[in-house]
């Protein structure tokens, strides 16, 4: 019988202090900083002159979980992991997640990333169960490379880029030195819901339209990275599409190969292997609950899937992760379960595994 021998969440979100940027940014940038203001019944997250998100007050389910409490600390994170039966976590930002990639000014965007990266590394980088991810600016690639190198020195385990960079897509040659730098240092993550509005639809059905569009959209980034030869030119580069489910992946891999073969007269650059080969070798996706994805394993393999709880977001599996894992992995071989539930993440993010991962839980 399949057991969940250990769980590592490849997708969690840490609550930064609400005033992090206003406290730490220099005066010249402070009035455009990411900030939370009360407007009527809503608490509004702003950056520059843009309203990023509105949350009904009081905020629900940890979106603003740090509200008034100065943000998470190691003790609160470990307590949540223990309650959920999860050994370790990869930590993405929360407020910064929503607003960093909406910022248009490259200098402000880079400063916002630096401040977050300083805070998250000061707080969490030393704990072996916690793997904070660094925020990389994207508007100015030279600043992104500088920040990537700084993230490595700070002990951060991956670098976050937006799932979409519509102002300059990822097949632009200006990114080449960034891919090169990342290939030699740390994996890159592209978290669903970053780089584009998460709420383009309004009115009837809007919540469903927005969710489907947001979590399905990283297929486009996969096609950019595979089709343009980024992964071929940088065989050491590892890329993860975060919180996007995996059910779309089998179809996307097949569609890329179909395009490569059937539209060969239009395809450039020519690749040495099929586009899907590069993703199977160098790419990952994370999901919380995904029966469809797990039924597609004969197309995708288990190497490129990782489970994540998405704690503390409402669409995540906390505090029922163990039960949800047991149910959705019940019919799969133990080696497949181990790979998706902890081993792929342990290898990618360099988590040490405890002895208990060899015994039943
Ligand atoms: Mn997430």
Image (spheres, rainbow, N blue to C red):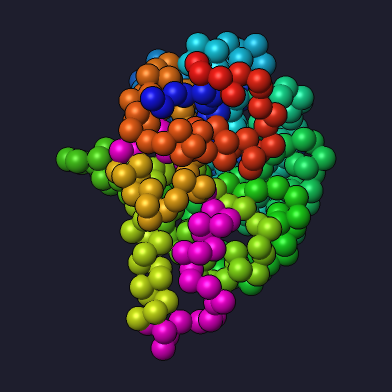
Q: Is residue 297 visible?
A: yes
Asked whether, in this view, residue 241 is left or right of residue 186, the answer is left
Q: Give the number of marks.
A: 0
Magenta stretch encompasses residue 173:
no
Q: Is residue 159 left or right of residue 335?
A: right
Tell me which residue sits at (25%, 40%) in the image: 208
The residue closer to the viewer here, 54 or 158, is: 158
Q: Residue furthest bottom?
A: 265
The residue depicted at 51 percent of the width and 23 percent of the height is: 5
The image quadrant of residue 230 is bottom right
Quarter containing the N terminus: top left
Return the residue nearer the eye: 168 or 9: 9
Residue situated in front as seen by the camera: 63 or 127: 127
In percent of width and height, residue 72 lies at 61, 18
Task: Determine whether 229 is above or below 56 in the image.
Answer: below
Residue 224 in the image, given as x and y percentages of width and height: 50, 65
Using the image, determine if residue 119 lies above or below residue 61. below
Q: Is residue 288 magenta?
A: yes
Residue at x 58%, y 47% (from the top left corner): 189
**Quarter of the rendering containing residue 133:** top right
Q: Which residue lies at the image location 47% right of the left edge and 46% below the top edge?
A: 302
Q: Nearer the viewer, residue 246 or 54?
A: 246
Instruction: Residue 193 in the image: state x and y as whole percent.
Output: 44, 44
Q: For the view shown, which residue lies furthest in the front direction?
A: 1
Give residue 11's position: percent from left, percent from top: 52, 34
> Which range is magenta?
263-291
Report if residue 27 is visible in the image. Answer: no
Looking at the image, the residue that sits furthest to the right is 153
Q: Quadrant of residue 74?
A: top right
């Amino acid at each position: 019988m399949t057991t969940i021998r250990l769980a590592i969440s490849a997708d969690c979100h840490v609550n930064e202090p609400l005033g992090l940027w206003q406290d730490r940014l220099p005066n010249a940038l402070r009035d455009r900083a990411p900030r939370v203001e009360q407007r009527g019944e809503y608490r509004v997250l702003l950056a520059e002159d843009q309203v990023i998100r509105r949350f009904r007050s009081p905020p629900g389910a940890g979106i603003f979980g740090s509200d008034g409490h100065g943000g998470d600390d190691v003790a609160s994170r470990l307590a949540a992991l223990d309650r959920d039966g999860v050994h370790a976590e990869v930590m993405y930002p929360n407020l910064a997640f929503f607003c960093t990639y909406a910022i248009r000014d490259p200098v402000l965007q880079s400063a916002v990333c630096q401040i977050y990266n300083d805070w998250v590394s000061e707080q969490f980088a030393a704990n072996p169960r916690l793997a904070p991810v660094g925020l990389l600016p994207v508007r100015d690639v030279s600043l992104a490379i500088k920040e990537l190198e700084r993230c490595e020195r700070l002990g951060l385990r991956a670098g976050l880029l937006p799932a979409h960079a519509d102002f300059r897509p990822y097949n632009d040659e200006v990114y080449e030195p960034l891919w090169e730098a990342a290939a030699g240092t740390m994996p890159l993550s592209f978290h669903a819901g970053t780089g584009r509005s998460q709420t383009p639809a309004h009115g009837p059905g809007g919540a469903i339209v927005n969710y489907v569009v947001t979590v399905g959209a990283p297929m486009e980034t996969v096609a950019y990275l595979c089709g343009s030869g980024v992964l071929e030119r940088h065989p050491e580069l590892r890329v993860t599409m975060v919180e996007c489910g995996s059910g779309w992946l089998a179809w996307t891999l097949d569609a890329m190969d179909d395009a490569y073969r059937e539209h060969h007269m239009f395809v450039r650059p020519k690749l040495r292997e099929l586009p899907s080969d590069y993703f199977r070798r160098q790419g990952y996706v994370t999901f919380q609950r995904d029966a469809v994805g797990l039924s597609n394993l004969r197309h995708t393999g288990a190497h490129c899937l990782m489970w994540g709880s998405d704690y503390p977001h409402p669409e995540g599996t906390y505090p029922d992760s163990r039960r949800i894992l047991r149910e959705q992995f019940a019919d799969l071989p133990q080696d497949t379960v181990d790979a998706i539930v902890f081993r792929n993440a342990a290898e990618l993010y360099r988590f040490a595994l405890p002895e208990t991962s060899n015994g039943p839980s």
